[in-house]
Image (spheres, coloured by chain):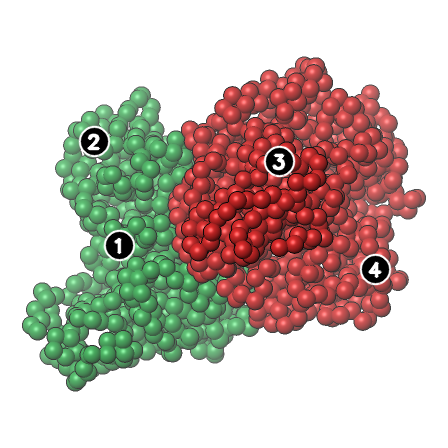
Chain colours: A red, B green
């Protein structure tokens, strides 16, 4: 049950369109669960926390899966130091669930800043505050997963990228020429390390101007794009939010005095970012959004099939106005008599120029003729820009899927694109953060998501990259990305590249399963990755485990995220089949009992756990995603009665994906073990399934093995045993 | 076996006096283990690492107990962001042990920068590099602990503080008046939370001038000090390295043109720190060191018994010269045309003003008439300043112990003072860093050590403070310290202060054991805290465990260092007696078997593990350290044959501590269980020991309990059974 509350005299300045379902609007005084107080300026929601209450959600945020014990802030921010004392990151995902004496979900729909004091000021109180008009939703249900599904149904289906976007992707800020990139492709292909795309960071542009391509360093761009595609590699260019102020530059010229955000005086707002001084497209204005979106066409026309939208919090190195204050201050100083106080005054002024919230009060939008100060709707900027992108793309290519993901985000944007989790570091703690953040993102609808594997900023060590790949092979967005000036991070740069290659090859073998699970999460509003306690909800031992995840319906993973470790503790919440991949094509199986275990996990080995009576699919892999779906599909499991698996697959290219693409594989041991797959449906006959149940049977000695029959049933569960 | 190597034509500019033992000097070409290469400028030590080789040591450093997989730098630095990508902290502790196919220790004695590439550039190579003259020592032995003991013997006995310095200590940068501090004392005493000292951060001074006291805010300072002492609270003032340039200020006036470090031109070097512009005492010059040291006398004379030396890396916010370059740059800029390049040039110039290594090339020392550029001897500065302090104090009070600890440090300084681990953060990861760093500090002789409990910078949450106290009760320096502007961190500020109080009370009950273990570590060159694998050296399961420590000879601890956890995994390396303190005076016992366990550890409970046939002492606690040694001593253990414990105690005040203060308590079950304690020695008769073996016996049902006899034996092990 989902209910909506709002204050009639305190309307949101812009419709966020986060929720697409019609939800009954109730009197705000009757808000369930939350104690709501409104003063002139501030709306406060309070909730008393019992000792054992847990809080889940908030999507892209610092800290753990259980969010209790910190102060979070929803205010999209370009701050690359994701230490545990930060209050927010690039996204604003105001959905959370409290589970304890009561269980309910809450979504605060608000384009401005919202703070979530989850037992920070007082350990037994949750206090949510905002000074901005908002609507809030309360969702009740029988479990966390039920509430998540209801919420996801309300906010609409998540974005689906093309299938190739599930392949391995290589990126680096610092590929300065097309030769650099061709070399990357060559090195990957030469070594047989699968790869599906390479990214173009800001280096490909002319002077960091959006929708330009550097004429010398990336000469014959169209041919370059098409040649790469011949090698099954897509090139994915970046698009930044800021538009360089430069005469005769088409984007600037067509936008100026018309489609850009304004300053207080009504002039186009000026900020400093990579290109130097820029204006920002006023994407809250529908015409401006359309105008900005149509520039993507040029790149689509020459064969580009994916984009990443960056710097769209929007990120600012400085605003012209704030910079003026610094140089006025600097001008006032008697530098000959410079003293500590001057220093302590000037240094923070300069350090706080970037990503300064004060600047957001200096920017104005024009929404249907109304002037809206940016800080009131700040969290919508990246969302609306990315929506504009996808809407423009859809206009061009309505039947095709295009890859798109963004750095800034707000719930609602999940329908138009994925996200990456921004400029992380080559830190072990950020690998762990990646692990903990994925379920929260799933809760908020951001299914196509992932972190920069190996870490963006910082010099990764070989072992960290290896461990990160071991986890990354399970995330939908599987991209290795790294900053300029840092240690080179392509797999082939490392002596142990052959081991890393096995990990990527394993990803490609897992793709039939991972893609199937991803698509079902989209279609049925499920979580792609979830913590153990969401599923094993009465298992107290599972409650605090935040470093193991369920990936889809069949498997659990327990990544290693600490240096110099060759194993780790794993809590196994039910008897499971442990599968240890010593390389992509060789694995060992072992039944492992419910309980706590210390399990050896040397670098380069992937250990996963298949739930009893659930099935894992394994393809034959390949050098690109297309290949990975061509071979036979293996089915691995441990079954003591019956297992069935709803296998989703489609062409991976067109937008007509849906439930019709599911076939159910069922294995039963009523009288004998059998696998049914439809022999009637056309096309499917070509597919060969193979079964690996031997070791499982080894533990079930009484089971007879006979012929395996193939049969497919429809989604209505029509198999007769 | 310890051997020393050096190059005769590449002498160290200053004797570090790190090693006090006469060690045979060998030909450097015959260096064992390490492949040594010398070019004109650089000395390089290489060692091939096998896959399982581990590296321990480096004292105060980032990352784990096993140091493999990162690039470390010995170059004392004031950088408060102790993230895992940093290469060094405030100390320079160049001792490490490699354990694997071979086992050996190495100490690079060098006042300049040394880098330790421990499998960072190449995962199978350790490469140690320095451009500075050095001597190096290779220590061979049969085990890590053996090598540590040999090294510690060579570098001399560690500093011993007065016993009261083992009490709970409260500090905050931001106690602005003596009333603030009196209030802290009042609040602790009122609630019965034990406390032994309160710190005076820079606020107590006049304009941050060393050896001054603010006349209004800290009026009647002597009376204030003495009044506090009547309440059994010592006040511990801070002394910074930089001396304010101010006419008529006695330290400046007596030091100028004489005892300060010089710049290139031979003028007193000028830097900016808290007082504004300062000079730095040239503590490498013996006369200057003596001159600086004698100022401590004024404070000793009015009853001060402890100091902390800060900012002695030396820390610099800016040097005059570097600042000049910034304002020259700023002057050149056309601020009206300020562009991105200007920004990208100016911002780092300003951000890198502080703790900039270039400044260390602008400072010169005068050592016996020789002019030595600071960067060559940088790591000795804090050490020599602190040595000057202690030597001056000893001149005044030769028979008394005085508390002293320092932020910057080098091996050798461990004989003169303790250290705290600098400006950490209120991060869970820094609690873990604290845990992992303690054994490395023990290895290098820094026994009196601890981190700022609760974290210095940052807003601590109640649960983090609780968990940090749970660990902190085991560290010799047990100080809660916090930065100005941050959440107040005194225990009584929190709703759960009563639980925290129990933790502090437990510390006071543990003091007889902890102090005894600390003193034995000093006297016998042992480690006060060590990882499991140092003791259980053939136990493969113990090898990678870095979040459990052995404290002294009898107990193991396994602190919780993650938020929202009420338990954790513990590896128990042998059958042990688990003691769970539900509060300071109530505990439960349970035998726990060798192996992996998941153990419940709710906030506020302390769980520790007593080794079989080892004894834990428990006093009766008290409100100050003095009281904590007055009551009865409890002995808790689980014995199946015989246990003995060498119990060290002394008056805690005078410098004549030594082996003579050990009595051995022995418990045996030859025919019956008995405890021997000497009845003959005077004074000891007053002491009452009590035994809690019941639950232990409960697990040894066949054991008869009879009368307990008391007997003491001497250190020569003369007990006859």
Q: Residue at x 63, y 41 (%)?
A: A515
Q: Residue furthest bottom?
A: B707
* Tag 3 and tag 1 share a subunit: no
Mark 2 lies on a secondary structure that is loop
Q: Is residue B9 above or below residue B479?
A: above
Residue A614 disc label: none
Disc nearest the viewer among 3 and 4: 3
Disc nearest the viewer among 4 and 1: 4
Q: CA distance from mark 3 to mark 1?
A: 55 Å
Q: Is residue A218 left or right of residue B388?
A: right
**Residue B116 image offset from top left, x and y in percent:** 36, 36
* Tag 2 and tag 4 share a subunit: no
**Residue A624 image offset from top left, x and y in percent:** 60, 29
> Which residue in the protein does label 3 denote?
A687
Would you say the residues marked 3 and 4 are in contact, meaning their CB atoms lie under 8 Å apart?
A: no
- Mark 4 is surrounded, within 10 Å at the Cα level, by few (under 14), some (14 to 19) or many (20 or more) other residues, namely some
Disc nearest the viewer among 3 and 1: 3
* Tag 2 and tag 1 share a subunit: yes
Q: Is residue B280 above or below residue B500?
A: above
> Which residue in the protein does label 4 denote?
A23
> Which residue in the protein does label 2 denote?
B31
Q: Residue at x 68, y 21 (%)?
A: A225
Q: CA distance from mark 4 to mark 1?
A: 63 Å
Q: Residue at x 80, y 46 (%)?
A: A374
Would you say the residues marked 2 and 1 are in contact, meaning their CB atoms lie under 8 Å apart?
A: no
Disc nearest the viewer among 2 and 1: 1
> Which residue in the protein does label 1 denote?
B536
Q: Is residue A63 left or right of residue B21?
A: right
Q: CA distance from mark 3 to mark 2?
A: 66 Å
């Amino acid at each position: 049950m989902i209910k909506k509350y709002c204050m009639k005299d305190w309307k949101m300045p812009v419709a966020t369109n986060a929720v697409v379902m019609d939800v009954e609007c109730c009197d705000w005084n009757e808000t369930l669960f939350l104690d709501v107080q409104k003063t002139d300026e501030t709306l406060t929601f309070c909730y008393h926390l019992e000792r054992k209450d847990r809080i889940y959600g908030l999507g892209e945020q610092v800290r753990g899966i259980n969010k209790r014990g910190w102060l979070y802030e929803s205010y999209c921010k370009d701050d690359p130091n994701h230490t545990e004392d930060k209050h927010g990151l690039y996204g604003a995902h105001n959905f959370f669930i409290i589970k304890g004496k009561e269980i309910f979900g809450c979504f605060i729909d608000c384009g401005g800043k919202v703070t979530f004091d989850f037992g920070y000021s007082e350990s037994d109180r949750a206090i949510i505050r905002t000074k901005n008009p908002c609507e809030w939703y309360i969702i009740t249900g029988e479990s966390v997963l039920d509430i998540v599904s209801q919420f996801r149904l309300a906010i609409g289906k998540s974005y689906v990228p093309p299938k190739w976007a599930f392949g391995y992707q290589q990126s680096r800020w610092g590929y300065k020429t097309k030769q650099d990139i061709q070399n990357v492709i060559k090195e990957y292909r030469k070594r047989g390390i699968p790869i599906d795309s390479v990214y173009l960071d800001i280096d490909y542009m002319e002077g960091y101007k959006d929708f330009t391509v550097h004429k010398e360093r990336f000469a014959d761009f169209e041919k370059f794009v098409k040649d790469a595609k011949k090698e099954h590699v897509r090139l994915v260019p970046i698009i930044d939010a800021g538009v360089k102020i430069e005469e005769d530059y088409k984007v600037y010229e067509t936008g100026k005095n018309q489609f850009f955000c304004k300053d207080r005086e009504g002039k186009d707002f000026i900020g400093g970012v990579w290109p130097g001084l820029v204006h920002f497209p006023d994407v809250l204005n529908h015409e401006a959004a359309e105008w900005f979106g149509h520039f993507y066409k040029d790149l689509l026309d020459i064969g580009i099939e994916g984009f990443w939208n960056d710097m769209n919090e929007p990120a600012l190195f400085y605003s012209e106005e704030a910079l003026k204050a610094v140089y006025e201050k600097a001008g006032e100083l008697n530098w000959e008599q410079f003293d500590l106080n001057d220093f302590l005054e000037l240094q923070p002024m300069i350090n706080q120029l970037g990503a300064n919230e004060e600047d957001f009060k200096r920017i104005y939008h024009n929404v249907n003729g109304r002037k809206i100060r940016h800080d009131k709707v700040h969290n919508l900027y990246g969302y609306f820009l990315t929506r504009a992108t996808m809407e423009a793309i859809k206009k061009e290519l309505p039947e095709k899927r295009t890859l798109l993901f963004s750095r800034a985000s707000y719930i609602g944007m999940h329908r138009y694109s994925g996200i990456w989790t921004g400029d992380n570091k080559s830190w072990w703690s950020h690998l762990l953060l990646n692990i903990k953040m994925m379920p929260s993102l799933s809760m908020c609808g951001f299914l196509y998501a992932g972190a920069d594997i190996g870490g963006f900023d910082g010099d990764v060590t070989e072992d960290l990259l290896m461990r990160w790949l071991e986890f990354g092979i399970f995330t939908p967005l599987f991209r290795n990305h790294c900053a300029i000036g840092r240690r080179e991070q392509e797999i082939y740069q490392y002596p142990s590249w052959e081991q890393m290659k096995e990990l990527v090859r394993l990803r490609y073998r897992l793709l039939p399963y991972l893609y199937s699970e991803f698509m079902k999460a989209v279609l049925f509003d499920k979580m792609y990755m979830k913590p153990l306690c969401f599923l094993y909800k009465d298992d107290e031992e599972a409650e605090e485990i935040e470093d193991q995840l369920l990936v889809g319906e069949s498997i659990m993973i327990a990544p290693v995220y600490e240096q110099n470790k060759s194993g780790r503790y794993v809590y196994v919440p039910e008897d499971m089949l442990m599968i240890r991949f010593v390389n992509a094509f060789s694995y060992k199986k072992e039944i492992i009992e419910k309980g706590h275990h210390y399990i050896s996990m040397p670098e380069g080995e992937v250990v996963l756990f298949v739930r009893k009576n659930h099935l894992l699919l394994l393809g034959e892999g390949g050098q690109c995603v297309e290949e990975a779906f061509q071979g036979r599909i293996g089915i691995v499991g441990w079954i003591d009665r019956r297992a069935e698996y709803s296998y989703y697959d489609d062409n991976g290219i067109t937008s007509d994906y849906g439930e019709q693409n599911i076939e159910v594989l069922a294995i039963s041991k009523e009288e004998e073990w059998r696998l049914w797959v439809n022999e009637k449906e056309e096309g499917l006959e070509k597919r060969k399934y193979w079964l690996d149940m031997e070791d499982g049977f080894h533990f079930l000695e009484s089971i007879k093995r006979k012929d395996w029959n193939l049969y497919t049933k429809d989604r209505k569960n029509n198999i007769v045993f």
